[in-house]
Image: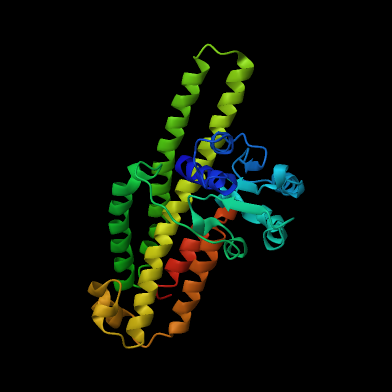
Amino acid sequence: MKYLLEIALQFAANINCQKNGCMECRVCINTLKAKYPNLRILDPAGSSILMEEIQEFIYSMSVSSINNEFKIAIIKEADLGGSAFNLLLKTLEEPPDEKCVFILLAEDINSIIPTIKSRCQTYNWIFKGSAFENYDKRFQDFKIELEGWLTGIMSDRKNISGALNFTGNVGIFVKEICGEAVKRQKKESEKIKKSGLDDDEIKRIVKKLDEKHKREIKKITNLIIMHVFDIMTACLEDIIAAAAGSRQEALHYPENYNIINESFKSENINKYTGLLRVIRENGIYLNQGINYEIALDRIVLGLVQH
């Protein structure tokens, strides 16, 4: 989020700077410090963006700008918006005036509700040293395990208990990764408590750290489940493609071609297009607190023979 905010502030400085973003004038310097009067930043106080925060933010954008400059609104952690963002729809469609610019920052764009995302122009960046970089290797290893579990389920479709273990194994990985984040939080909190600051300041900082880590855990969980959904989607698309007569090389996982042809003979592909719809719907609302275990069970049990 740090890098995204830096880019957003540079963009904001460029908009109002008389020299197209010189980064040296008063406008640029104060904007980069996030202390410019025509700049509004919404930084969620908790693990989600509240209705009250959105309402106050919208009102602040209705106030006239100074010196007839652009009013620039930056929303940090926009992927935490959820249903509160419904209040923002009308403002995005009909801004208070033509000099309003809204910038939404999100590390997981798939968690932004589609009605909001469809009204925005999207830019993607990949940063080295991001918060999730340390998990890349482990995600890759986990991906290989997931693919193996799904292949096993597709080749032995009468093994219902094996299919149910799939969700349990995903849950174990989620708890393992999130547990590490909790340990880091405790270390940081203990360090603050021993800092010698007064009690009120310690409470304020610890509370802020707690909220930060709640957001981190929520994002990590969603990232893992989105990886799982992506792999399940690829497997379902392979079943549908093979049933429709596609050749082996057209599949996401060509090595599963014979398994699919043997295990899914004469299957009604409507069943699997329905499971794809379940994945898509759950992916959209993942950030709104859905029970991912129920969603995974529903999808994986759709692959077994009852």
Tell me the colour scheme of the image: rainbow
Identified at 43% across, 83% down, the residue is 269
Identified at 59% across, 54% down, the residue is 288
On the rendered image, what quadrant is the C terminus found in? bottom left
Seen as rendered, the residue at the extreme front is 19
Identified at 71% across, 43% down, the residue is 67
Seen as rendered, the residue at the extreme top is 196
Identified at 39% across, 58% down, the residue is 165
Residue 9 image position (x, y, % from top left): 53, 42
Q: How many marks?
A: 0
Q: Which of 58 and 187 is in front in this view?
A: 58
Question: To which quarter of the image does residue 30 belong?
Answer: top right
In this picture, residue 97 sits left or right of residue 196: right
On screen, residue 260 above or below 106: below
In this picture, residue 265 sits left or right of residue 277: left
Decide if residue 211 is in sight here: yes
Q: Nearer the viewer, residue 53 or 297?
A: 53
Decide if residue 164 is in sight here: no
Residue 195 image position (x, y, % from top left): 50, 14
Question: To which quarter of the image does residue 161 belong?
Answer: bottom left
Residue 178 image position (x, y, % from top left): 44, 41
Q: Nearer the viewer, residue 37 or 157?
A: 37
On screen, residue 272 above or below 33: below
In this picture, residue 56 sits left or right of residue 8: right
Residue 14 image position (x, y, % from top left): 53, 47
In this picture, residue 68 sits left or right of residue 105: right
